[in-house]
Amino acid sequence: MNPSPSAAAPARHGATHLNVRFALLQGAYFLMYCAINAFIANNLLSYGISHAVVGMAIAVGAVGSSLIQPPLGRVLDRRGLTPRRLLFVLFTVGTALSLALPFVQSAAVVTCLYVILFIIGQTAQPFVNVQGLSLGAGVNFGLARSFGSLAYAVAAVIIGVVIANLGMAAYDVTMAAFFVACDACLLLFPASPATDDVERDVVQEPVGQDAEADAVIADAGLRAEAETDAKAPAMGPAREGRGGFVRRYPLFVAALAAAFFILCGHNGIGIYLIDFIGDLGGNSQSLGVATAVAACVEVPFMANYQRIRQALSCTAIVAASGTCFFLKSLATMLATSIPMIYGAQLLQALAYALFLPALVELAGHAVEERDSVTAQALVTTTITISFAAASLAGAALQERFGSHATLLAIVAVSAVGALSLVAMAPRMRAAFHGCERLARLPRKAA
C-alpha cells in the first residue's frame, strides 16, 4: 500500500534533519583535520625543526593512528562507551593541546604535541563516520562527506591566511576553535543511537581527502565480521597465511605494489608541498589556496563516482587515475610559478578522487569472498605504509638534495606505478569478475 502524502512528508523531514546533523559534524571535523594534516610540515619547519625530524614525526603519527584504531574499536564494543563519548574525549584533548602550543618553547615538546594532534585527527575519522551512521534512517553518507571536503577547502584558505598574517599563535587558537566546533556538533547528536522511523538511503561511500582513514572505515565492518566468524566452528579448509594469499592472487598483489608507488608520489607532494611552493616564492597562504583547489575539484567526482562507473570499468578507472597522478607530479615538477602549482592541483579531480574508491572496489572483486577481509586490510596497509615511506624518504631527499631531487623521485615512482597499472589493466579486467561497467539504473518515475 502506498504511503499517504502526510506520512511521506515527516519521513523526508526526518531524513533531512539527520543529514544536516551529519553534514555539520563532517564539516567541523574536516576544518580541524585540515588544520593538522595539510599544515603539519609547514608548522614544524617554522619552529626550525629539520626535515628528517618532520618526516619521522609524520610517519610515527600515521603508523600510530593505524595501530590505535583497532583497540579503540574494540573498546567501543564494551558497554557504556559510545563513539560520541570517545570523540568528545579526543576533541577535548585536541583543544587542550592546541591551546598549550603557544606556551611551549621546546622544539622537541612541540614535535611530540603535533604528533599527538596528528594521531587524534587521523584516529577520529572512522568514529566520526560511525557516529553519523548510527543515526540510521535516512543518512546520506556521500552528501555529508562532500560537505566535509568543502569544509576542508575553506579551512585551507583560512589557515593559510592566518599563518601568513597573524603567525603561529593565531593558528594554534584557530585549530583549538575547530576542535571546539567538533564538540559543539556532537551535541546535536543524541547520547544513544536515534530510532527515527524513516527509510534509510543506501548511498555508495566516496573516498575523500584522507583515504588512510576512509579505507580503515570501509574495513571496520569486515574486521568485526571476521572476528565473529573466527569464533564460529570452522566450516571449510584452514586458511593459508599471507604467503598463500600472494600465491593465490599474484595479480592483485602486483596491483597493490603499483598503487604503493603511486601513493608514495601523491603523499610526497602533499607533505612537502610547502617546500615546493616556497622555492617559487610562495608562503603558507599559497599552500592554503593550493590545498583548497585540490579539495574543491575532488567534490563533484567523489559525489558522482557511481555514475562514472557506468561509463568505465573499475580497472580502467584505476589505470586512468594512476596516470593522472603521474601527470600531476610531472606538472608540479615543471611548475615555474605559483599559478602553475594551482593548475597542477586541478588534476587531483581525476586522480585522488577516483583512485582510492576504485582501488577499494577492486579489492572486493579481485579475491574470493573468504579472502575479502585480508584484501581490504592489505589496501589499508598499503595506504599507511606509503604515507610513512613518503614522509621518511621525502624528508631525506629534501634535507640532502633539495626540492628538485625530491620532485624527480616523485615523478619516477609515480611513473613506475602508473605504467604498471596500465600494463596490468587488460589482465585485471579479464581476471577480476565484477570490474566491468555498471549497468545503468532505470530512472525513477516522477
Image: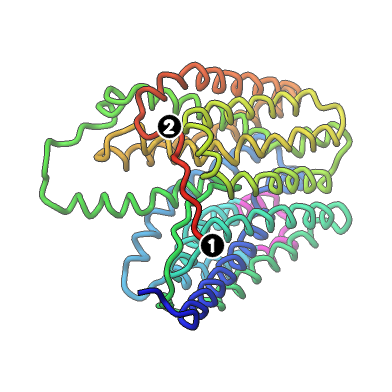
Depth-wise, is mark 2 or mark 1 nearer the camera?
Answer: 1
- Name the residue: 75% across, 29% down: 332
Residue under label 1, please give it: 446
In the image shown, does 283 or 189 lie closer to the viewer?
Answer: 189
Please indicate, yes or no, whether residue 175 appears anywhere in the rendered image: yes
Asked if residue 190 is positioned above or below residue 310 in the image, the reply reads below
Left or right: 60 as drawn, with respect to 266: left
In the image shown, does 400 or 394 lie closer to the viewer?
Answer: 394
Q: In which quarter of the image is residue 334?
A: top right
| Residue furthest to the bottom | 6
**Real-space CA distance between mark 2 and mark 1, rounded to the nearest whole angstrom:** 30 Å
Q: Is the magenta stretch mostly helix, strand or loop?
A: helix
The amino acid on which the numbered mark 2 sits, given as a three-letter code, is Glu
- Name the residue: 54% across, 43% down: 307
Left or right: 207 as drawn, with respect to 394: left
The magenta segment is 98-114
Dot 1 falls on a residue whose secondary structure is: loop
- The tag earlier along the polypeptide, 2 or 1, is 2
How far across and how far down the image is residue 384, in percent? 49, 40
Q: In which quarter of the image is residue 405?
A: top right
The amino acid on which the numbered mark 1 sits, given as a three-letter code, is Ala
Dot label at residue 5: none
Please indicate, yes or no, whether residue 61 appears anywhere in the rendered image: no
Residue under label 2, please give it: 436
Q: Residues within 10 Å of mark 2 (few under 14, many from 20)?
A: some
Quarter holding the N terminus?
A: bottom left
Q: Is residue 244 magenta?
A: no
Dot 2 falls on a residue whose secondary structure is: loop
- Name the residue: 52% across, 32% down: 312
Asked if residue 193 is positioned above or below residue 228 in the image, the reply reads below
Asked if residue 245 is positioned above or below residue 66 in the image, the reply reads above
Left or right: 426 as drawn, with respect to 233: right
